[in-house]
């Protein structure tokens, strides 16, 4: 019998390499029955499987095809020279090369390289295997140098499905399991497009604490495969919405109009800076008559155009909805992405408003999660929960993140946190002597407890409101530098996972910070003690808010 862990063991794609592989030596897999389609249940059975057969082409074969294309184009030019004449230098070189004895060796070398490349792609696909158990997702890859990557299901921060345009033509998708930690994500590239959606549901059921006794009550009947042909299925995948209407009700989805999206990009900081720079360059050219300045700034404008274009296409078809397994976010036009954030995986929220967006009343929402993307563009996409929206959109998204903020009192405090100027509200603001350090914002600079979250209100020109769920707080600190201590002020910092949001507020009265420090300490300990969001579908998880300090995701 072959080694059950041998990736060269013969078998069809998607068929387990060898049944009965335990999670750990001496620890058999527990019985887990998932109410998902048979294809997803087979891939999540704890045994080793292979990826989509087109994976080698999608991951590395495209560059190989491009090289072949360059060779074909050059050969075509040589052929045209032979047919129609011309006697170019390249043609004379090939004629001399053909007359020598090296032609046959060159042809053999090209054939050997082609065979080795095809064989390498095949071996790479055969040795790239994965398995999903009720405890972890594991991927093994590599031919000479083997790598093994594991992600525990209880540390999942979200599941992201990306469909690049070329992969969509092949009916494939990339599934990325975001795990807490720096560059700790586990990537399955590529799977069948429909199978990736079903497998995401299976992983979320496993991560939520679902077991055989409750699987039937949690999910509906398994979907039957379509009967249409290959072309019809590809067209349906290209035109289908990113969020399944059956799992994401239309009334819970925020949609962004194209005029608003374009307007937000034109009024963004990089665009305004580029316009001012262009005005300065044009003025300089007119004044001095030196047109060389245009060529100096041209690469910058081309880069800005590419950046804005990627932001636009990435935000088209944006949708966000609440599902049984968390918040589902989808975006993209040609290359599409949708991500599911399970309950309790958002550690901090920031609602901000750039200065140029203020007349239109637009806001942006960013989040901190425990998983960190490897690329900056991917990280930007995953930390921006709402690219642009009005006040009504902000309230709807915040209620998805923190359902406990839906009551009238919390909504009032949220509106006070986003409003301009000073208000007679429950926020504890900076004293008047802090105006030496916060010239414009000392009246707005403040904090308050909103239900089961801590709210930090900052900024007068660039407004922002930071919300940190109490159950997600890691620690709280109070800092006093020499200047702050002399003025009787202090800085409050709430420590969360790394991300674009810094939950820090300064220039506060020292006594107010000390009282708030003690209050938040007890509230955070209680919230962490009753938090069951990591097993949101298990029988032990609460489904109703027991107290004002209910953990995130329990509404």
Image (cartoon, rainbow, N blue to C red):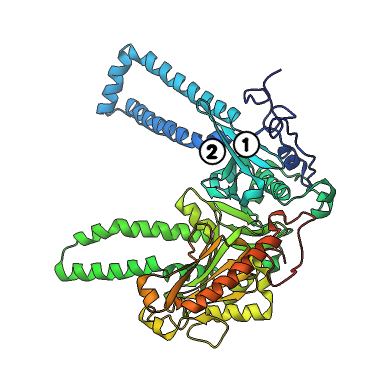
x, y percentage for residue 521?
Answer: 59, 67
Can residue 462 be seen by looking at this rendering? no
Q: Are marks 1 and 2 in contact (CB under 8 Å)?
A: yes
- Give the CA distance from mark 1 to mark 2: 10 Å
The image shows residue 250 at horizontal and vertical percentages of 69, 66
Q: Is residue 61 above or below residue 429?
A: above
User: Residue at horizontal 33%, vertical 25%?
Assistant: 82
Local packing at callout 2 (Cα closer than 10 Å; few below 14, some 14-19, many 20+) is some
482 is higher (above) or lower (below) than 175 = below
Q: Residue furthest top?
A: 101
Residue lying at 74% horizontally and 40% vertically, measured from the top left: 39
The structure residue drawn at horizontal position 29% and vertical position 67%, both measured from the top left corner, is: 278
Instruction: Give the number of the disc on residue 52.
Output: 1
Helix, strand or loop status at disc 1: loop
Quadrant of the snapshot with the C terminus: bottom right
Residue at the image position 71 percent from the left and 33 percent from the top: 47
| Number of marks present in the image shown | 2
- In the rendered image of this protein, does residue 99 appear above or below residue 466? above
Instruction: Please identify the quadrant where the N terminus is shown.
Output: top right
Is 371 positioned to the left or the right of 106 in the image?
Answer: right
Q: Which mark is residue 58?
A: 2
Q: Residue 386, image x and y in percent?
A: 55, 65
């Amino acid at each position: 019998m072959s080694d059950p862990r041998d990736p060269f063991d013969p078998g069809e794609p998607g068929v387990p390499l060898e049944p009965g592989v335990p999670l750990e030596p001496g620890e058999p897999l527990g019985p887990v029955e998932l109410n998902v389609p048979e294809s997803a249940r087979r891939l999540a059975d704890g045994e080793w499987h292979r990826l989509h057969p087109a994976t080698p082409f999608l991951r590395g074969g495209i560059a190989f095809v491009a090289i072949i294309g360059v060779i074909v184009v050059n050969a075509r030019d040589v052929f045209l020279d032979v047919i129609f004449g011309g006697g170019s230098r390249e043609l004379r070189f090939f004629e001399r090369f053909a007359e020598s004895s090296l032609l046959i060796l060159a042809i053999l070398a090209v054939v050997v390289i082609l065979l080795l490349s095809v064989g390498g792609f095949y071996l790479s696909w055969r040795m790239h295997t994965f398995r999903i158990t009720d405890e972890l997702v594991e991927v093994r890859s590599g031919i000479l140098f083997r790598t093994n990557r594991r992600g525990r299901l209880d540390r999942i921060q979200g599941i992201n499905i990306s469909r690049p345009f070329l992969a969509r033509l092949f009916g494939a998708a990339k599934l990325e399991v975001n795990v807490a930690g720096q560059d700790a994500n586990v990537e399955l590239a590529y799977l069948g497009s429909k199978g990736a959606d079903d497998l995401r549901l299976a992983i979320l059921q496993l991560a939520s604490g679902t077991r055989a006794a409750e699987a039937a009550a949690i999910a509906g009947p398994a979907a039957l495969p379509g009967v249409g042909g290959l072309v019809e299925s590809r067209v349906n995948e290209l035109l289908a919405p990113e969020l399944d209407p059956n799992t994401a009700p239309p009334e819970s989805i925020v949609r962004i109009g194209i005029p608003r999206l374009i307007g937000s990009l034109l009024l963004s900081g990089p665009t305004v800076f580029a316009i001012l720079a262009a005005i300065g360059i044009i003025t300089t050219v007119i004044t001095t008559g030196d047109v060389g300045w245009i060529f100096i700034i041209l690469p910058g404008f081309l880069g800005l155009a590419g950046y804005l274009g990627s932001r636009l296409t990435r935000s088209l078809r944006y949708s966000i909805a609440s599902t049984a397994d968390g918040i589902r976010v989808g975006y993209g036009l040609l290359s599409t992405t949708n991500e599911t954030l399970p309950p309790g995986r958002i550690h901090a929220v920031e609602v901000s408003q750039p200065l140029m967006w203020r007349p239109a009343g637009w806001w942006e929402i960013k989040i901190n999660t425990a998983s960190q993307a490897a690329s900056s563009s991917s990280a930007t996409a995953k930390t921006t929960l709402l690219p642009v929206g009005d006040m009504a959109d902000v309230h709807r998204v915040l209620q998805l993140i923190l359902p406990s903020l839906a009551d009238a009192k919390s909504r009032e405090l949220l509106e006070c946190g986003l409003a301009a100027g000073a208000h007679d509200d429950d926020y504890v603001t900076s004293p008047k002597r802090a105006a030496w350090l916060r010239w414009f914002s000392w009246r707005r600079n403040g904090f308050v407890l909103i239900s089961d979250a801590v709210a930090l209100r900052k900024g007068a020109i660039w407004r922002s409101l930071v919300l940190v769920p109490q159950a997600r707080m890691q620690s709280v600190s109070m800092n006093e530098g020499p200047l702050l201590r002399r003025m009787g002020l202090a800085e409050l910092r709430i420590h969360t996972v790394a991300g674009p949001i810094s939950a820090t507020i300064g220039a506060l009265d020292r006594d107010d910070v000390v009282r708030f420090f003690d209050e938040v300490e007890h509230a955070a300990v209680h919230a962490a003690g009753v938090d069951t969001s990591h097993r949101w579908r298990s029988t032990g998880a609460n489904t109703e808010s027991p107290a004002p300090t209910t953990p995130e995701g329990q509404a």
